[in-house]
Image: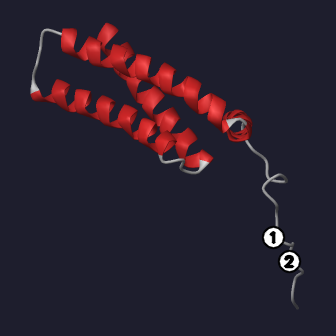
Amino acid sequence: MRTPSLPLSYSEKQQRSTGITKVYNNLLGEFTRQQTGYSTIAIIAQSCIGSVAAMVLLMSNLHDLSKMVLLFFVTILCMGYNAAVLAQLKSKITFNMLLVSLLFSCSIIIANLL
C-alpha cells in the first residue's frame, strides 16, 4: 500500500524565515527599489568606515604581516563594492558586497580597539 505524499512545492514567501532573514529581505528590497540613491550614500559610508579601519590598523604599534594582510582585505573589500556600483551589477550582489565590506571593516575596528 502506498502512502500519500505531501506536495513539496513552496514559494519563497510561504517558507518560514527567521528574524534576521526578514530584516535582510526587507533591506534588500528597499535597496533594490532605490538602488541609485542608496548606492551613492553607501559608497560614502563604507569608504569612511573602511578608512577608519585602515587607520586603526596602521596606528597599531605592530606592523607585522598579519596587520598588512588585514589592511589589504579592508582595501580590497571597499574597492570591490565601489567597483560593483560603478559596473552596475545586480542589486543583490551589490548589497551583499556592501554588507561584507561593512561587517569586515567594523569587526577590524572593534577588534583593534578592545
Instruction: Determine the image quadrant of residue 23.
Output: top right
Q: Name the residue nearer the viewer: 111 or 38.
A: 38
Which disc is residue 75 wearing?
Answer: none
Q: Residues within 10 Å of mark 2 (few under 14, many from 20)?
A: few
Identify the residue at image location x=12%, y=14%: 62
* On screen, residue 66 above or below 7: above
The answer to whether marks 1 and 2 mark residues whose Cβ atoms lie closer than 8 Å is yes
Left or right, 17 with reference to 112: right
Q: Position of residue 104 (x, y in %)?
A: 40, 29
> Dividing the image into 4 quarters, which one contains the C terminus?
top left
Identify the residue at image location x=32%, y=29%: 74
Q: Secondary structure at mark 1?
A: loop
Left or right, 61 with reference to 46: left
Identify residue type, mark 2. Answer: Ser
Identify the residue at image location x=71%, y=35%: 34
Instruction: Determine the image quadrant of residue 7.
Output: bottom right
Mark 1 and mark 2: Cα distance apart in space = 9 Å
Q: Name the residue nearer the viewer: 59 or 1.
A: 59
Instruction: Identify residue for label 1.
Output: 8
Instruction: Identify residue for label 2.
Output: 5
Identify the residue at image location x=36%, y=35%: 79
Let me know if residue 114 appears in the view. no
Left or right, 94 with reference to 8: left
Q: How many marks?
A: 2
Q: Position of residue 92 (x, y in %)?
A: 60, 47
Q: Nearer the viewer, mark 1 or mark 2?
A: 1
Q: Position of residue 75 (x, y in %)?
A: 30, 30
Let me know if residue 5 appears in the view. yes
Q: Secondary structure at mark 2?
A: loop
